[in-house]
Image: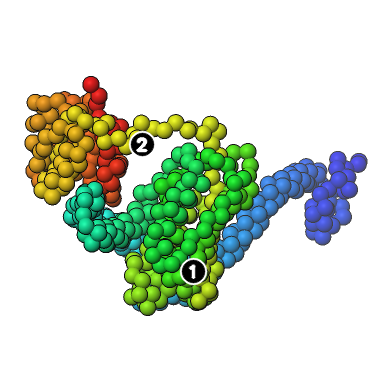
């Protein structure tokens, strides 16, 4: 009888057990065949389940290996970051009492504590910086207010001197008296220049200067500057030559006032530091495009010159080449500083070449737009006919007696009818009851200033022109227009400028 199950069908492990432990004739026992069959099935089932378990365990091992690899990378990255952070912290400008600890890449507690201390320290620094900035702004505002007040206090009496000098020149005097008046005029003009230099420089530094775009003739501009300075130059036996390139377009667009200021500073400086000799103003076309012109400008003198080591200093504020020059020639040392900053506003740069005893040459290139349709019409306000304003009714609002006396002298000379008010409150009351063709309004007055008075007037009178008379030029222009004024005249005022402003704005019957 053949066995139900052949030996070769046994599981390998079961076959080995049979050979080792059962007799050769075990198959003659019928129960043994069923028993071995059941054990064999169990062995194969166990083998199958073992393979299934291995199949399940194998992905988990791969996943574990991947996680382990990533953890190692993260640990290495963290250690590298800690090292770089430590190196960065060690290069910081730390407070003297801050000792840099030895950081452990595996223990970040000390690093976290130290960074927290640094953040607290940085916050303290930021608070100090904010306070310092606030203090600086307050100091700047205080300086501006001080300069504004000082300009008013200086210009108010200066206005009286300038105006009286002008009026005295219109009268008949002996030759000796006229000479004295000329000396007085020269001194007041110098004082006015010094005050203007200081105020202009602060306006530029405060960013209050904006360049205008006006159609003008640059040849007329430099010619007028030459003529205005020639008399003073002739008194020092100094000749002024003008070399002008006629190929420069006749009409350009720019800021003639600021360009005049630049040229006046340079030419006046040349005259100031030249006792005898020659000054040459040269204006040449550098190149011309469709809508702009680049113009080279230079002012050359045969004066005392500047030592090479002093050249970098001359454009600094309140600086001269040396102390002997300040004592000998005077001045604030602001003229060239203002010139430099004004040219920077134009996108240009002032340059200088000089040798001691052989004079100096200041030069720059300025870019100006060319005018498409030059305006050759003479504006009405430019005509200076003293009879034009005859019969015009004006309200003069002014608290300073000398200024009242001077202003009314001019108004009488021009045949105008005037009324006066000593402060803004009185001015508001008079305008509510009377009609005027124009108001001349001082800004700083007791009881009610000119700004407040104008705001009150504009509540019931939108029509009557109001012109500000101000001795303060800082932070004035914007506010003048904000409160409803039509324009302003700066003290000490030029009589012709005052006449033109009244002529321009006065209401006509």
Question: Can I make out residue 449 in this image?
Answer: no
Left or right relative to 339: residue 371: right
Q: Quadrant of the N terminus?
A: top right
Q: Which residue is mark 2?
A: 382
| Front tag of 2 and 1 | 1
Please tell me whether residue 439 is drawn above or below residue 210 in the rendered image: above
Q: Which residue does the image show at 70% across and 51% down from the upper left?
A: 58
Of helix, strand and loop, which one carries label 1?
Answer: strand
Is residue 173 or residue 229 the one in the foreground? 173
| Residue at horizontal 40 percent and vertical 71 percent from the top | 320
Please state the horizontal and vertical placement of residue 434, each as a whole percent of the image: 11, 26
Residue 157 vs residue 302, the one in the foreground: 302
* Visible residue check, residue 508: yes
Quadrant for the C terminus, please. top left
Question: On the image, numbered disc 1 is attached to which residue?
Answer: 277
- Asked if residue 25 is positioned above or below residue 333 in the image, the reply reads above
Q: How many marks?
A: 2
């Amino acid at each position: 009888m053949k066995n139900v199950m052949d030996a070769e069908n046994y599981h390998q492990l079961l076959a080995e057990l049979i050979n080792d432990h059962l007799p050769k004739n075990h198959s003659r026992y019928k129960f043994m065949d069923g028993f071995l069959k059941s054990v064999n099935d169990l062995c194969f089932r166990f083998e199958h389940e073992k393979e299934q378990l291995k199949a399940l365990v194998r992905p988990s091992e791969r996943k574990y290996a991947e996680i382990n690899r990533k953890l190692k990378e993260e640990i290495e990255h963290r250690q590298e970051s800690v090292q770089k952070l430590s190196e960065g912290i060690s290069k910081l400008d730390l407070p003297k009492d801050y000792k840099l600890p030895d950081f452990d890449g595996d223990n970040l507690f000390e690093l976290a504590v130290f960074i927290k201390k640094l953040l607290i320290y940085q916050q303290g620094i930021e608070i100090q910086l904010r306070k310092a900035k606030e203090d600086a702004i307050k100091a700047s505002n205080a300086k501006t207010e001080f300069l504004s007040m000082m300009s008013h206090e200086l210009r108010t009496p200066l206005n009286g001197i300038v105006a009286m000098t002008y009026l005295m020149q219109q009268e008949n005097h002996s030759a000796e008296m006229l000479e004295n008046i000329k000396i007085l005029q020269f001194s007041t003009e110098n004082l006015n220049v010094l005050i203007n230099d200081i105020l202009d420089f602060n306006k530029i530094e405060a960013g209050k200067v904006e360049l205008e775009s006006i159609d003008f003739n640059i040849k007329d501009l430099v010619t007028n500057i030459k003529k205005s300075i020639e008399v003073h130059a002739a008194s020092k036996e100094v000749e002024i030559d003008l070399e002008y390139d006629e190929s420069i377009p006749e009409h350009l667009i720019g800021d003639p006032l600021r360009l005049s200021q630049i040229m006046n500073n340079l030419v006046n400086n040349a005259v100031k530091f030249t006792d005898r000799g020659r000054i040459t103003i040269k204006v040449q076309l550098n190149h011309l495009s469709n809508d702009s012109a680049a113009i080279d400008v230079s002012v050359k003198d045969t004066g005392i010159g500047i030592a090479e080591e002093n050249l970098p200093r001359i454009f600094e504020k309140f600086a001269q080449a040396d102390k002997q020059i300040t004592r000998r020639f005077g001045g604030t040392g602001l003229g060239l500083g203002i010139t430099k900053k004004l040219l920077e506003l134009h996108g240009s740069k002032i340059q200088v070449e000089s040798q001691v005893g052989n004079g100096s040459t200041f030069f720059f290139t300025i870019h100006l737009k060319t005018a498409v349709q030059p305006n050759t019409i003479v504006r009405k306000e430019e005509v200076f006919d003293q009879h034009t304003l005859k019969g015009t009714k004006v309200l003069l609002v002014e608290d300073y007696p000398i200024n009242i006396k001077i202003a009314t002298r001019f108004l009488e000379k021009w045949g105008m009818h005037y009324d006066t008010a000593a402060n803004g409150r009185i001015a508001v009351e008079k305008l509510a009851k009377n009609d005027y063709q124009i108001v001349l309004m001082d800004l700083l007055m007791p009881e009610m200033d000119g700004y407040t008075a104008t705001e009150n007037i504009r509540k019931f009178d939108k029509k009557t022109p109001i012109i500000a008379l101000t001795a303060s030029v800082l932070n004035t222009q914007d506010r003048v227009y904000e409160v409803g004024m039509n324009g302003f005249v700066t003290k000490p005022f030029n009589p012709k400028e005052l006449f033109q402003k009244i002529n321009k704005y006065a209401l006509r019957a």
